[in-house]
């Protein structure tokens, strides 16, 4: 059995010569792709081999100038890049600002006290913290049952939130260059590796809350899914604090920033297969195409609790810590 790379070397050299790539040199012994220093053709049977003479083309349907790449074949992450390019060049985004972080001694001390409280929850949330470090999209996919073969348009919205959120976060991280908590107080010992970029604002929290707005403000609003979506956004953000790689101010700044970014994103337009479509219109298309059966009240029996308000975060985490570690 051949492995598809080194096997079939003789045919590779012979066909390569016939198709204009040049036969394998004698020194290679016709050993195939691994032995030749330049490209050789993979062996093909009839009718494709005849394409070099034109005879094989008779087997292909006639095509005209209107043939295009199928919409459904677009990778969601590449669709996201189209929206990102337009968003990044918008005047509203260029003029966007966020509050200056609390980097004076008293501010750092206050923030570090919160991170120390969060640390008590590490064992309880360790598995999901590690999973979310590199792949938070997995949690959205599980919650909404989406993917390449299930609601792919919704998956593209998640990809937009991830791409735009990362871009915006890096812009402001580069502006303020706030050190990670353990760089200020090494005894924190974060449970995951510190990312290779500054702390403020939180990229994970920004992405999560931007996705929350994208879904709840145009796709799943009125379906009963708003609360679990909001809860997941909060959980992803706060898990970064529990891990010891973010301050509370990082998370709260990202929550405020996500709302502003979402408002800008709604008016962004791209050219899509000869039409100009706004992001808000795209949200409506996704809602109609992939969520027509989900109506208000269907998720009302789910026992989800409203996420805490920012001012109640410290108390809620402390209460949870005491329950986890009596």
Image: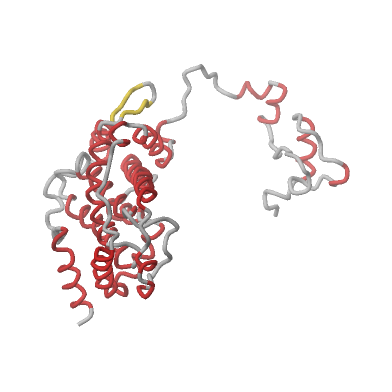
Place of residue 128 in the rendered image (x, y in percent of width and height, measured from the top left) = 34, 65
The quadrant holding residue 313 is bottom left
Q: Nearer the viewer, residue 29 or 56?
A: 29
Residue depicted at 79% across the width and 39% down the height: 13
Tell me which corner region of the image, top left, top right, bottom left or bottom right, holds residue 117: bottom left
- The residue furthest bottom is 326
- Give the left or right position of residue 312, taking residue 88 as reference: left
Name the residue rendered at 30%, 36% in the picture.
Answer: 93
Q: Position of residue 324 (x, y in %)?
A: 22, 77
Q: Position of residue 121 (x, y in %)?
A: 27, 73
Q: Residue drawn at (68%, 32%), measured in percent from left and top?
A: 46
Residue at figure coordinates x 77%, y 40% from the top left:
11
19 vs 300: above or below: above
Foreground: 197 or 75?
Answer: 197
- Residue 215 higher or lower than 281, as above or below: below
Q: Position of residue 81 (x, y in %)?
A: 41, 38
């Amino acid at each position: 059995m051949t492995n598809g790379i080194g096997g079939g070397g003789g045919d590779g050299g012979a066909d390569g010569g016939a198709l204009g790539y040049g036969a394998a040199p004698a020194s290679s012994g016709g050993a195939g792709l691994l032995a030749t220093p330049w490209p050789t053709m993979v062996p093909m049977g009839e009718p494709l081999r005849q394409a070099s003479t034109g005879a094989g083309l008779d087997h292909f349907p006639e095509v005209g100038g209107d043939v295009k790449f199928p919409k459904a074949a677009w990778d969601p992450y590449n669709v996201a890049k189209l929206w990102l390019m337009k968003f990044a060049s918008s005047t509203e985004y260029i003029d966007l600002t966020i509050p200056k972080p609390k980097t004076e001694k008293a501010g750092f001390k206050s923030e570090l006290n919160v991170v120390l409280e969060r640390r008590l929850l590490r064992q309880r949330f360790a598995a999901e913290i590690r999973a979310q470090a590199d792949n938070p999209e997995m949690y959205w996919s599980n919650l909404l049952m989406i993917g390449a073969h299930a609601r792919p348009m919704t998956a593209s919205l998640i990809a937009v939130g991830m791409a735009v959120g990362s871009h915006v976060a890096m812009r402001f991280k580069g502006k303020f260059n706030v050190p990670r908590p353990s760089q200020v107080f090494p005894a924190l010992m974060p449970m995951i590796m510190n990312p290779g970029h500054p702390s403020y604002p939180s990229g994970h929290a920004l992405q999560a809350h931007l996705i929350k707005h994208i879904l709840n403000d145009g796709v799943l609003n009125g379906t009963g899914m708003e609360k679990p979506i909001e809860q997941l956004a909060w959980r992803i953000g706060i898990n970064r604090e529990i891990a010891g790689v973010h301050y509370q101010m990082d998370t709260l700044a990202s929550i405020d920033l996500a709302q502003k970014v979402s408002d800008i994103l709604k008016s962004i337009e791209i050219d899509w297969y000869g039409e100009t479509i706004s992001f808000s219109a795209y949200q409506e298309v996704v809602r109609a195409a992939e969520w027509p059966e989900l109506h208000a009240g269907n998720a009302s029996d789910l026992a989800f609790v409203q996420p805490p308000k920012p001012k109640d975060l410290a108390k809620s985490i402390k209460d949870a810590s005491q329950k986890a570690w009596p």
